[in-house]
Amino acid sequence: MTVEACRLAAHRTEYPQHIGVTEAGTYADGIVKSSMGIGALLLDGIGDTIRVSLTGDPVREIEAGLSILRAAGLRRDYVEVVSCPTCGRTAICVEEIASRVREATKDIRKPIKVAVMGCVVNGPGEAREADLGIAGGKDGGALFIKGQPPRTVRGDLAQILIDEIRRIVS
């Protein structure tokens, strides 16, 4: 109903619209509902400001709102971390590394795409759009930076990637 009402208002008026899904619910359900409603409108070019309503800490509403704007392609001021869904060839803990990299780079306001891939078989190819990334290997990983040949790295792969990101943005 919210999406239909906003679309109707957009077609009938020239007024700016503040869009959001009221009473979206607890965090997980609220994120999905807000993303669907707000995202659909933003992709239609509707909406001048947004509001995400979640039960709990209002800081999470702001984070969710930024994520929606970023997913819609309206904000490019962050480190985007992409990762593979993992398979039998996965040689590293993709989820842990991706989460650590995302958390450690939240303060960076530059458009950088970083890939965390589980294996060196498909990783570099799947991550070809990334500016840099890591692909898991037997005893470490391959660090790849756009325009350079991959290099073998060993140790704390998340920290290696974080350090490389910080070097690039400095």
Image (tube, rainbow, N blue to C red):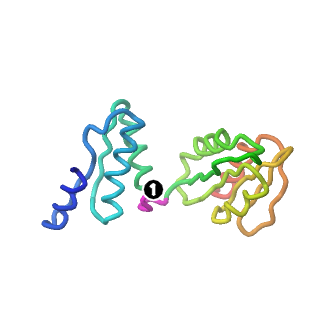
Q: Residue furthest front?
A: 88
Q: Nearer the viewer, residue 139 or 160?
A: 139
Residue 146 lies left or right of residue 64; in this view the side is right
Q: Residue furthest left?
A: 12
Residue 102 lies left or right of residue 42; in this view the side is right
Q: Nearer the viewer, residue 79 or 22?
A: 22
* Segment tinted magenta in the rendering: 70-76
Q: Position of residue 154 (x, y in %)?
A: 84, 45
Q: Position of residue 63 (x, y in %)?
A: 43, 43
The majority secondary structure of the magenta stretch comes to loop
Q: Is residue 27 above or below residue 149?
A: above
Residue 5 position by quadrant: bottom left
Residue 121 lies left or right of residue 65; in this view the side is right
Residue 140 lies in the magenta-colored region: no
Q: Position of residue 94 (x, y in %)?
A: 68, 44
Residue 71 lies in the magenta-colored region: yes
Q: Nearer the viewer, residue 48 or 140?
A: 140
Q: Quadrant of the C terminus?
A: bottom right
Residue drawn at (41%, 44%) of the image: 64
Q: Is residue 101 above or below residue 74?
A: above
Residue drawn at (63%, 65%) of the image: 129
Residue drawn at (25%, 54%) of the image: 3
Q: Amino acid at mark 1?
A: Arg
Q: Residues within 10 Å of mark 1 (few under 14, many from 20)?
A: some
Q: Position of residue 92 (x, y in %)?
A: 75, 42
Mark 1: which secondary structure? Answer: helix
User: For mark 1, what is the residue?
Assistant: 70
Q: Residue furthest bottom?
A: 147
